[in-house]
Image (cartoon, rainbow, N blue to C red):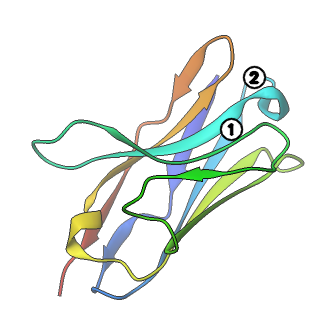
Amino acid sequence: AQLVESGGGLVQPGGSLTLTCAASGFAFNSYRMSWHRQAPGKERELVASIPSFGGSTTYADSVKGRFTISRDNAKRTVYLQMNSLNAEDTAVYYCNAKRDRAYWGQGTQVTVSS
C-alpha cells in the first residue's frame, strides 16, 4: 500500500493551495481518508476526514470554512483545498487511509509566510 502526497509549498498569508494524495495497493474505495498535519514542536492533529463513499465530512475547528476535503474514487485520489491560509497552517501535511488497518503517506510541507 502506498499514499503519495503532493501540492505543498510556500504560499503567502491569505493564499490557497490544493494538496493531492494518490493511493495505490489497497481497496481505496472502502477506506475512510483523512488529512492530518504536524507543526514543529506539536503533536500530529486531524485536519479533515471523509468517509469511503463521500458524504459527511469532518473538520478541525481551526480549518472549518477554509479547507475542503474531497475524494475521487475512480482516480483513487483525495484532495485538500486550503483557502485563506495563515501562518498557523504551516506544517507537514499527511494523508491517512483507515479501515481495519491504517496507512500513512510521507507528508508534504506547507509553509505560509510573507
Image quadrant for the N terminus? top right
Residue at the image point whose x is 73% and y is 24% from the top: 25
Q: Are marks 2 and 1 in contact (CB under 8 Å)?
A: yes
Task: Determine the residue positioned at 49% across, 35% down.
Answer: 105
Total numbered badges shown on the rendered structure:
2
- How far apart are labels 2 and 1 at the CA level? 8 Å
Q: Position of residue 9 (x, y in %)?
A: 35, 69
* Residue at image location 49% in from the left, 66% down from the top: 64
Instruction: Check disc 2 and report its element: helix, strand or loop.
Output: loop
Q: How crowded is the residue under tag 2: few (<14 C-alpha within 10 Å), some, or many (20+)?
A: some
- Relative horizontal placement of residue 3, taking residue 106 as reference (left or right): right
Q: Amino acid at mark 2?
A: Phe
Which residue extends farthest left?
41
Q: Relative to 59, does residue 86 appear above or below in the rendering?
A: below
Residue 51 shown left or right of residue 66 in the figure: right
Label 1 sits on residue: 23
- Residue 87 horizontal/vertical position (percent): 21, 73
Q: What label does residue 15 carry, if any? A: none
Instruction: Give coordinates of residue 83: x percent, y percent.
Output: 47, 79
- Give, as a three-letter code, the residue at label 1: Ala
On the image, which quarter does residue 36 sit in? top left
Residue that protrudes farthest toward the front in the picture: 61
| SS type, badge 1 | strand
Give the quadrant of the C terminus. Answer: bottom left
19 w.r.t. 104: above or below: below
Where is residue 84? Give x, y as percent: 40, 83
What residue sits right under mark 2 in the picture? 26
